[in-house]
């Protein structure tokens, strides 16, 4: 039985939406993108959404929008994908890495200690779909002594007059905090619609604005839309529909817009996200949870507790008291059964580029510990119960073989559907 790690969910509704786009003869940014943005706003209850061509470009855009530049610092976790740090470096600023906690999320106390007068932004990362403690981060950035440290050096910084809180929500579309969308917990939330995400546009991302009331959200939306099109005041769709050929470039923008042909893929998926795709992922995650909690050797990921609910993007299983090498051997055993698994993530200080910049994994013991014991299992709507059982059995067998001991009896029983 061959089980891929994370194939896209492509059904007839996706095909129909893409074909519809092709038949209109308009495939770049246009009405499908607008519709996708509206669906994201509906899902998240945020004030505005701007679709872009990747999470990375969305992060670069928002850092530039805020005026982040050389000499500034942006606090990020050491445990994340490289794009979190690279977006900061692309703006000329310095990523200040801090450690994480056992739920994979950024250590809020480490964040507090890392803040200086150079800190302009905090980017918290929702690993595997589990939302960070944004209420604690918000409390920190609003403390009087922290706000006194802040030095506004751009118009947007002056309006906000404090550190900007960005959620790297590449994994967490649909995650909840205290009964509402987790996207409402930060100033800016950026989603990824990459091919392996819960909702995909093949490549793409979306910026959600939840800025305080002293920002004109409609004006910021229009400005950011222009920013994604080289700072041009009129997009191609407007020009093609009798808007006239004349345009102007108002500022130095970027070319990072999402095309309609990509939005069409995501549009068909997001319309059934809350009724089909997300519930399916949740069911699978809880099946794994019920199976693996029978064994003391496994450390289970947080899914639904303390007012937080995951988006069930990844199932990050950890094995207790093993080495990184043993974890790798376990992965080899699992993949020998034609099951594709992954690791999320290799901490940034372990990667060559960041090592050259002076970051050391020894400074982030929790990040290394979580990485060294983690295996990401397949989780997506197309997984049948038979395949789930096959995966669970393969994991148990691999752990037993590498640890050279019987870790318990696994009964094959039906699992309650949540």
Image (spheres, rainbow, N blue to C red):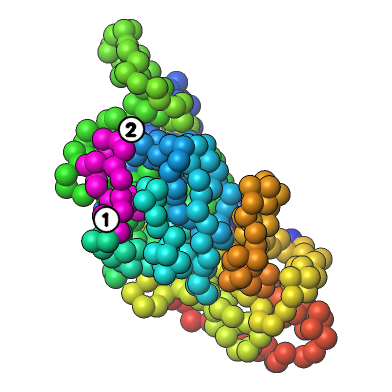
SS of the residue under disc 2: helix
In the image, is 290 to the left or to the right of 321? Answer: left
| Residue 125 visible in this rendered orientation of the protein | yes
- Residue highlighted by disc 1: 147
* On screen, residue 295 above or below 128: below
Residue 308 appears at what percent x and percent y? 37, 71
Determine the residue positioned at 40% across, 22% down.
252
In the image, is 124 to the left or to the right of 296? Answer: left
Residue 155 within the magenta-colored segment of the rendering: yes
For marks 1 and 2, give the CA distance.
26 Å
Residue 273 within the magenta-colored segment of the rendering: no
Location of residue 20 by image quarter: top left
Closest to the observer: 252 or 38? Answer: 252
Which image quarter is the C terminus in?
A: bottom left
Q: Residue furthest left?
A: 214
Determine the residue positioned at 71% across, 75% down.
395
In the picture, the disc for residue 224 is 2
Location of residue 236 by image quarter: top left
In the image, is 389 to the left or to the right of 160? Answer: right
* On screen, residue 302 above or below 168: below
Determine the residue positioned at 32% across, 12% down.
248
- Range of the magenta residues? 146-167
């Amino acid at each position: 039985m061959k089980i891929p790690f994370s194939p896209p969910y492509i059904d007839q509704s996706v095909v129909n939406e893409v074909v519809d786009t092709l038949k209109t003869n308009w495939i770049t940014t246009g009405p499908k993108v607008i519709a996708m943005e509206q669906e994201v706003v509906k899902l998240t209850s945020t004030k505005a959404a701007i679709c872009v061509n990747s999470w990375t470009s969305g992060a670069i855009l928002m850092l530039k929008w805020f005026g982040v530049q050389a000499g500034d610092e942006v606090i990020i976790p050491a445990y994340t994908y490289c794009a979190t740090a690279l977006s900061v470096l692309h703006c000329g600023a310095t990523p200040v890495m801090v450690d994480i906690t056992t739920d994979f999320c950024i250590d809020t106390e480490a964040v507090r200690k890392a803040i200086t007068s150079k800190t302009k932004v905090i980017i918290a990362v929702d690993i595997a779909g589990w939302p960070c403690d944004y209420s604690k981060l918000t409390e920190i950035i609003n403390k009087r002594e922290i706000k006194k440290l802040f030095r506004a050096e751009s118009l947007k910084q002056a309006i906000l007059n404090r550190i900007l809180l960005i959620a790297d929500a590449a994994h967490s579309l649909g995650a909840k905090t205290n009964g509402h969308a987790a996207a409402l917990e930060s100033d800016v939330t950026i989603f990824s619609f990459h091919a392996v995400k819960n909702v995909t546009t093949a490549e793409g991302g979306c910026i959600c604005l939840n800025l305080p009331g002293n920002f004109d959200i409609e004006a910021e939306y229009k400005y950011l839309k222009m920013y994604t099109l080289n700072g041009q005041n009129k997009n191609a769709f407007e020009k093609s529909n009798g808007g006239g050929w004349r345009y102007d470039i108002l500022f130095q923008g970027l070319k990072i817009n999402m095309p309609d042909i990509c939005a069409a893929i995501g549009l068909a998926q997001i319309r059934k996200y809350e009724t089909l795709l997300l519930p399916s992922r949740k069911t699978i995650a809880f099946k794994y949870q019920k199976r693996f909690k029978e064994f003391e050797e496994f450390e289970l990921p947080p899914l639904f507790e303390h007012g937080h609910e995951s988006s069930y993007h990844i199932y990050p299983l950890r094995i207790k008291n093993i080495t990184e090498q043993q974890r790798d051997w376990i992965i080899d055993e699992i993949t020998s059964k034609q099951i594709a698994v992954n690791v999320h993530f290799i901490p940034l200080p372990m990667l060559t580029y960041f090592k050259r910049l002076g970051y050391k994994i020894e400074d982030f013991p929790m990040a290394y510990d979580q990485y060294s014991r983690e295996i990401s299992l397949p989780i997506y709507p197309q997984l049948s119960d038979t395949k789930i059982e096959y995966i669970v059995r393969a994991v148990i067998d691999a752990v037993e073989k590498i640890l050279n001991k019987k870790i318990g009896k696994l009964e094959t029983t039906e699992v309650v559907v949540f």
